[in-house]
């Protein structure tokens, strides 16, 4: 398939660090797929990386070969795209995992978007954290 999927990702924690979640929204072939992953304790940056990795894993499972990947974390977008160095040791394995998944796409583009353009992924993260808080 040569259609380009849109992947929106986000992550968050309450407090920071604290109970966290990552989320990904994949729009492809006229459908929207929503994925979340709760994290018992993490920083918001780790949660952002987890949201990206979740989106990449699920996109590959769906057979997606081309993706426009969008998130509101400058840190994650610019580190994974190679524009910024990964200085924090605990983020390096997440960076490597994300880069490894990206190598499986025929074509991909990483795009930073303002938070206001990532509201669905943001709301999904918050719903996941809220749900984890009630259990």
Image (spheres, helix red, strand yellow):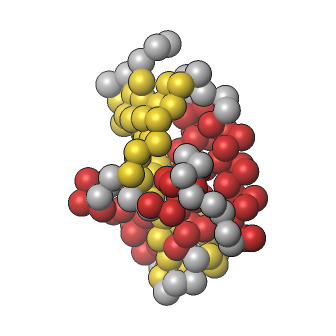
Residue 38: x %, y % from top left: 57, 65
Q: Is residue 127 visible?
A: yes
**Residue 86 position (above or below residue 130):** above
**Residue beneath the point at 49% across and 13% down:** 1
- In the image, farthest residue toward the left: 116
Residue sitting nearer the eye, 63 or 117: 117
Quadrant assignment for the C terminus: bottom right
Residue 8: x %, y % from top left: 41, 47
**Residue 120 in which image quadrant:** bottom left
**Residue 88 in which image quadrant:** bottom right
**Residue beneath the point at 33% across and 52% down:** 113
**Residue 128 position (above or below residue 120):** below
**Residue beneath the point at 67% across and 32% down:** 103
Q: Is residue 131 visible?
A: no
Residue 90: x %, y % from top left: 73, 70
Residue sitting nearer the eye, 93 or 132: 93
Residue sitting nearer the eye, 63 or 132: 63
Report the label total. 0
The reply, left or right, for residue 60 in relation to residue 24 is right
**Residue 121 in which image quadrant:** bottom left
**Residue beneath the point at 24% across and 60% down:** 116
């Amino acid at each position: 398939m040569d259609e380009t999927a849109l992947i929106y990702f986000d992550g968050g924690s309450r407090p920071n660090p604290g109970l966290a979640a990552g989320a990904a929204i994949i729009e492809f072939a006229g459908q929207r797929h929503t994925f979340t992953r709760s994290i018992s304790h993490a920083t918001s940056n780790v949660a952002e990386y987890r949201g990206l990795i979740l989106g990449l894993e699920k996109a590959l499972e769906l057979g997606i070969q081309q993706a426009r990947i969008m998130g509101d974390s400058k840190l994650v977008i610019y580190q994974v795209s190679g524009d910024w160095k990964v200085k924090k040791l605990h983020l390096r394995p997440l960076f490597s995992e994300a880069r490894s998944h990206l190598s499986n796409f025929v074509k991909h583009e990483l795009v930073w978007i303002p938070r206001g353009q990532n509201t669905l992924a943001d709301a999904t993260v918050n719903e996941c954290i809220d749900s984890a808080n009630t259990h």
